[in-house]
Image (cartoon, rainbow, N blue to C red):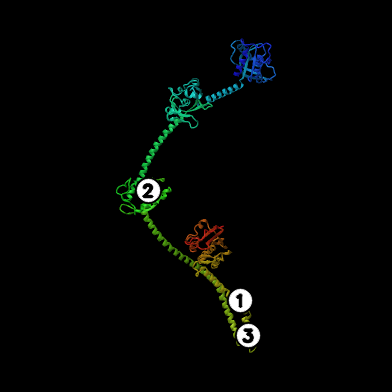
Amino acid sequence: MSDLFIELDTWLELDQPGTPAVAADATPGSTEHDGGAAAPPDAGGLAEQLLDAMGMPAWLHRPDRPMRANAALRRLCGLHRDTPADPLQLLVPDDRAALADASDECLWRSGEPPAQSVRLLGGNGSQRPVELSLRRVQLDDGPAILVTCQDLSDIQHVQTMLQGMSSLLGQIIDGAPVASFVIDRHHRVTHWNTACGHLTGHGADTMIGSTTPWRAFYDEARPLLADLIVDGTADAELAALYGDSAKPSALIAGAYEAEAFFPQFGPDGRWLSFTAAPLRDHAAQVIGAIVTLQDVSQRRRTEEELTRRLEQLVEARSAELAANARLMDAFIDNAPIGVVYTVNGDVQRANRQMTEMFGAAEPMPGGGRPDRPFYMAPDDLVHLRELAQLPFSRNEALHHEMWLHDRSGRPLWMQVNACPVEYSDDATGAWWMLQDRTEVRTAQEALRQRFEELQQTNQKLEQAQNQLLQSDKMASIGQLAAGVAHEINNPVGFVSSNLNTLRQYVGSLLQLADAYGRHSQPAGPEAAQQLAATLKAVELDYLKDDLPQLLDESADGLTRVKKIVQDLKDFSRVDQADWQLADLNAGLESTLNVVLHEVKYKADIVRALTPLPLVNCLAGQLNQVFMNLIVNASQSIDGRGTITLSSGAEGDWVWVQVGDTGAGMTDAVMRRIFEPFFTTKDVGKGTGLGLSLSFSIVQRHGGVIQVRSQRGVGSRFRVWVPVAGPAPGGQAAAPQPPAWD
């Protein structure tokens, strides 16, 4: 616009005094036809053309003539280009008088009045702030005023926003609970919030605008952290002014932190923590610094108190450790075992018991090796070190026993326990605890000998038990002898009776034969009559019928006797004393036949036997177990009851079960039934060895006896035996038997 004004001024000044005037009849656009230069256009018309060509809103004011607004001014006011517009009427009425005064000043006095801030009225009634610049120009018909208009709406909007933001930032800083102040690049205080005034005792009215913020903190002039940041000399002077208490901030680039004590703040002074950060413009240039202050007096006092308490605690702990060390020294010196501390094989410490155990005249030396080694052989030390290497590498202690000897050469059996002071560092040494266990070893040797003697005694007892087993078996057979005799007497009785009757029959037959012999041909009626009487007395027809029956009964009786004898033989197994395969069901049946005389009068026998595989066993001994269980079942029944015999096989095991409907047992009795000599029978009616021997027999077979009983309901005994027989040592060759469902 300045260039435009210069060009316009140069053009309009052609009509000023002293310059050639334009012909009165010349019109714009007229030219000479004789080939001369074209006449200049009309100055007024040219000014209006230039006015319309201007992009800035403007109008031309000439005295006593209507003012003319250009197109840019019409657009600014929201008017149509063809709408007539008086520029003075576009102004707010309150601003018109000021414009009139400025116009007079421009036309008739200085010619350059100051810019005027006025408001234009828009077509919709709105007001727009503008700045008017007036300049006098000389036209052909006289002086005029060129009024240019600059729209201030955007500028004022930006200024308002900036003022609002500045006010908001000022309120944020001033209202913040953290004390803070700001200095500009000239070290002038621009902000000093209320919290800072309360903390330092210097209000914002005395600090804002000053360049001496240090007086709020120090008695003499010295740069603050903010001054160092603004001057760019923070790194150089920071250590000199603040020592180790100042350091760069870990959160803000270019910021620094420091702590200092100010005795003038408060009755006891205050510790303040400073954080100073640079303020930068859009070009990243430092234009100031902001400082925040925090009162850390409480934290400092707490730290000091903690430090004081920590020092007291350290002192107390040190005294406690010293006391513990004295106690440990006393404990080690008076320990009943030998205690030695070594480093790389050198004895650093040894207690009194160590000296006494090895018979030293004086305490063992510290810081060296004993003058006489106490190992039985030179390789014992090497062997001990090799033994310690593995547990030490695993963070474990060494536990070992070995022979050593004292100074007199007397052998000592020592228990050695050792552990390093630090498992990861061999150079820290190791503690060794030695205990003389010579007497213990002697006692152990005596105990071992005693144990061997006990083993021998146990073997003798086992042999005695086997003899007792056989004796008990024989006693059982003796008890059964009466019953067996009774069972044998029955068939023998009727066999004897039948034989007597047979003798009589045979005698009669012999008489008949004799009679027939004498009277084979009766001589007369008297002989015939006598023969007939003899035949009638003998009852020959009856003899023919009865004699075969007698013989059959005699044969059956003899068969029964044979069966009883065979069952007795099977029960005793006198011809089968070695381990062999046997059918337990058959053994159970033969045993039942042997004791049937004692059972059949008290109980009904129910069989629930399942075919079993052959079992490797001592059949005679298992038969005795079955006999004991059946006899006990019979004796437990008061009146008449039922005895159930059952068997089965599961996996590698077979079982035989004897159940009864007897009186049952209590839990206390069941816990003791397998103890030797324990019995619930009256004196003289039981030895208390039956179930004990049965338990031993089953255990010898690698089996198990299980019992279930309920008082008033009855009992069940189940015998489990492995099919393959026992493994060496009497244990079952198969795993534990299945559960009893």
Tell me if mark 1 has few (under 14), some (14-19) or many (20+) residues whose alpha carbon lies within 10 angstroms of its own: few
> Hey, which quadrant is residue 150 in on the image?
top right
Q: How many marks?
A: 3
Q: Secondary structure at mark 2?
A: strand
Residue carrying label 3: 531
Do the residues bearing badges 1 and 3 touch, measured as CB atoms within 8 Å?
A: no
Residue 170 vs residue 349, the one in the foreground = 170
- Quarter of the N terminus within the rendering: top right
Residue 216 lies, with reference to residue 632, above or below; the image says above
Give coordinates of residue 535: x percent, y percent: 63, 83
The residue drawn where x is 37% and y is 48% is 432
Give coordinates of residue 33: x percent, y percent: 69, 15
Q: Secondary structure at mark 3?
A: helix
> Hey, which quadrant is residue 543 in on the image?
bottom right
| C-alpha separation, residue under disc 1 versus residue under disc 3 | 27 Å
Q: Nearer the viewer, mark 2 or mark 3?
A: 2
Residue 387 lies, with reference to residue 279, above or below; the image says below
Residue carrying label 1: 549
Residue carrying label 2: 432
Q: Secondary structure at mark 1?
A: helix
Q: Nearer the viewer, mark 1 or mark 3?
A: 1
